[in-house]
Image (tube, rainbow, N blue to C red):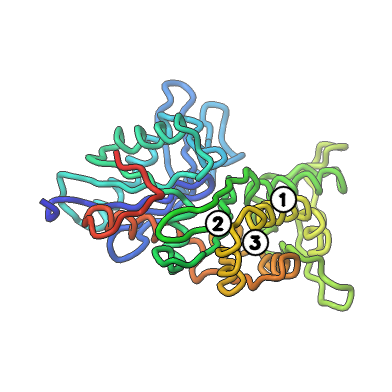
Amino acid sequence: MNVFSFDVGIDLGTANTLVCIKGGVVLNEPSVVAIQKEGRKILSVGEEAKRMLGRTPGSVIAIRPLKDGVIADFDVAEAMIKYYINKIKKQTSLFAWRTRIAICVPSGATAVERRAIHDAALNAGASRVFLVEEPLAAAIGAGLPVSEATASMVVDIGGGTTEIAILSLGGIVYSQSLRVAGDKMDEAIVNFVRRQYGLLMGESSAERIKQTIGSAIVPQASDEIQTMSIKGRDLTQGVPKEIQVDEVQIAESLAEPVAAILGGVREALENTPPELAADIVESGITLTGGGGMLRGLDHFLAEHTGLSVRVAENPLFCVALGTGMALEQLVSAKGRLHGYNRQ
């Protein structure tokens, strides 16, 4: 029966959706859908739709169907999942009459939010749906020994949520889901530029600044300070304007969301049983997700926790890869993971 089955692992993120099939990640596109206001007709999905953000005419809107890691617009999210599944089937030339999907959910998602994700995947054409806890998937994808009797700590910083978890023996001992992640960092940059320069800029521009000169640690005066130009609308005169910002200013603007993530990490460590805390002293903390790539974040967390902190290899792909690997275990029945719901 498995010959005619198509197994898919999906990291349904607030910022990006990644799809994994056996062999690796085959799709990585923004979680954005452009729709026509009248009739809500889907016009484009993914990269093309993202380019429309803030640039659409009145009759078209580009929206993100997910907010803080959970579905905010059910119909659009369902259409997006269906579009990506069909795209993968065409790309891989696979014939299958059954599609099994493992899809990750934030550890803090409510029962209603989990049901919405499950139903969206089912309505998109899945014959069976498995929900996998996001921090568990991140840890598996990062290659952590989650099935062993030793503690592993993962901090997955996505677009909408930061998932912090302590794992041992194939399950989650402690988890916390913060609604502070990449989007809040972008928002902090937008607010800083508005306050400091009276300039209104888009979230896409803020994201580029974060990726280019963003840092969790304020550079020293002796360091070579990078600068970047920003274009936007002057709030006073209402005309287009260009300014220069440097990485010191951006690091200061990111201080609040970075401090919130540190607070979540400290709270997780305070709630860790002593035996597992001893393991974490040895194994340290692993960062995954796009936010984990913020320059200097690993050093910042290491300095304030006294633990070793490393960024996983391919941090953007960890959750998608881990979701796919979890699905393989669930389907083969060779392993039993505690961080999933079988539907």
Q: Label 1 vs label 2: CA separation?
A: 14 Å
68 lies left or right of 27: right
Q: Position of residue 269 (x, y in %)?
A: 64, 58
Instruction: Decide which of tag 2 and tag 3 comes sooner along the chain.
Output: 2
Q: Are marks 1 and 2 in contact (CB under 8 Å)?
A: no
Q: Residue at x 43, y 43 (%)?
A: 45
**Total tally of numbered discs in the picture:** 3
Q: Secondary structure at mark 3?
A: helix
44 lies left or right of 21: right
Q: Quadrant of residue 127?
A: top left
Q: Secondary structure at mark 2?
A: strand
Which of the pair 26/6 is nearer the observer? 6
Q: Position of residue 317 (x, y in %)?
A: 45, 61
Instruction: Decide which of tag 1 and tag 3 comes sooner along the chain.
Output: 3
Check disc 2 and report the residue beneath it: 156
Which of the pair 160/323 is nearer the observer? 323
Check disc 1 and report the residue beneath it: 260
Q: Position of residue 177 (x, y in %)?
A: 58, 46
Q: Residue at x 33, y 38 (%)?
A: 121
Numbered badge on residue 61: none
186 lies left or right of 252: left
Q: Residue at x 55, y 63 (%)?
A: 276
Instruction: Decide which of tag 1 and tag 2 comes sooner along the chain.
Output: 2
In this view, 285 is above or below 239: below
Q: Are marks 1 and 3 in contact (CB under 8 Å)?
A: no
Tell me the amino acid under the disc marked 3: Gln
Q: Secondary structure at mark 1?
A: helix
Q: Residue at x 60, y 69 (%)?
A: 278
Which of the pair 315/62 is nearer the observer? 315
Q: Label 1 vs label 3: CA separation?
A: 19 Å
Check disc 3 and report the residue beneath it: 211
In this view, 92 is above or below 100: below
